[in-house]
Image (spheres, helix red, strand yellow):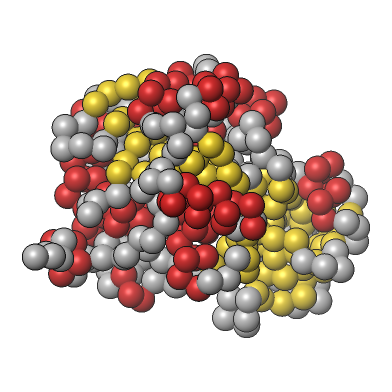
Amino acid sequence: MHHASPDATRVFTLSDFDFELPPELIAQHPAAERSASRLLDGRSAQPVDRIFRELPGLLQPGDLLVFNDTQVVKARLFGEKPTGGKLELLIERVLPGFEVVAHMKVSKKPPVGMVLQMVGGYTATLLGRWPDEDGQLFRLQFSDEPHALMEQHGHVPLPPYIEHSDSAEDVARYQTVFAAKPGAAAAPTAALHFDEGLLAALEARGIRRANVTLHVGAGTFSPVKTENLAEHRMHREWYEVPAATQQAIAETKARGGRIVAVGTTTIRTLESWAKTGQASGDTEIFITPGFQFQVADLLVTNFHLPKSTLMMLVSAFAGYKHVMGLYRHAIEHSYRFFSYGDAMLLQRSP
């Protein structure tokens, strides 16, 4: 007889995803070596403390690792209003015609049509809100090609809880070693632990690789504010599941291999594709406990912010009680949290 999991029948609220994190556990810098991070093996009831480079031995030949090959762009740009008020833009996506969609940090929002003088000698004209007039994002037109301007004048868009300004270390380390498609305002952080040596070891063990793309938006750090989760408005991100990846997934499943999603962004991409049948487009998928996963069997992921949509996603994947227990273990054993922190390996709960 099939019993629904306790998560499927329970009504979760925002408070369920809150926890007390000692601030000193928030990693401000990456580990000296990517694959030397710690890995909390949370596949069974009893957590096991490991090192990330042990991953090949935890997977099986014939398994398929799916990575997000997005590339973080230098999406943070500075400028000022004609009145002299300072402002900061965080580019979420580049549209045709030198247009961009961005978050804007400014004391008073400028009116539509205002021309902003940007640091580096170019301008940004405010066209309106995005995706509609109630949108939290802004649509602007640059005086030159946005990717070139970001490369030249932009800063690495480090997460809000990282307290230093970006350095050469961040340029190298807030990026995966296989980043290929520019467009993200945040790194797919679970993949930051993979270096060339580890990728070679995985290949030698007969573990295959495939890529999807999801341009991670800064909205990934926004805490949910509504106690009733159904009222949360999810941020939109562009994704793509290439034909070769669809084929690799089908072949792996047919052979009885497992799909190992590297990161919550990969899960969001795979499940958006499975749910809609669309291989590319915008996703606003909000995964909370009770969600029926269709693609991934295992998940490699970092430790997430309290009350974040990512905390809800991992709880949905591996079971709420189990995940909360793993977080307690991680805090007791001083794991490093968030983007530059350690990782965990989870199995999908039945």
Q: x, y percentage for residue 58?
A: 35, 28
Q: x, y percentage for residue 43?
A: 26, 37
Q: x, y percentage for residue 321?
A: 17, 49
| Quarter of the image with the C terminus in it | bottom left
Residue depicted at 69% across the width and 56% down the height: 91
Count of numbered circles on the image = 0
Q: Could you say which quadrant of the image residue 333 lies in?
A: top left
Q: Is residue 143 above or below residue 262?
A: below
Q: Is residue 347 left or right of residue 232?
A: left
Observer-nearest of 326 and 131: 326
Q: x, y percentage for residue 295?
A: 42, 56
Q: Could you say which quadrant of the image residue 107 lies in?
A: bottom right
Q: Is residue 245 above or below residue 26?
A: below
Residue depicted at 49% across the width and 33% down the height: 207
Q: Is residue 75 left or right of residue 6?
A: right
Q: Could you say which quadrant of the image residue 11 lies in?
A: bottom left
Q: Is residue 56 above or below residue 318?
A: above
Q: Is residue 237 above or below residue 169?
A: below
Specify whether residue 163 is in view: no
Specify whether residue 35 is in view: yes
Observer-nearest of 190 and 115: 190
Observer-nearest of 62 and 182: 62
Residue depicted at 58% across the width and 76% down the height: 135
Observer-nearest of 114 and 56: 56
Among all residues in the image, which is located at the extreme front?
255
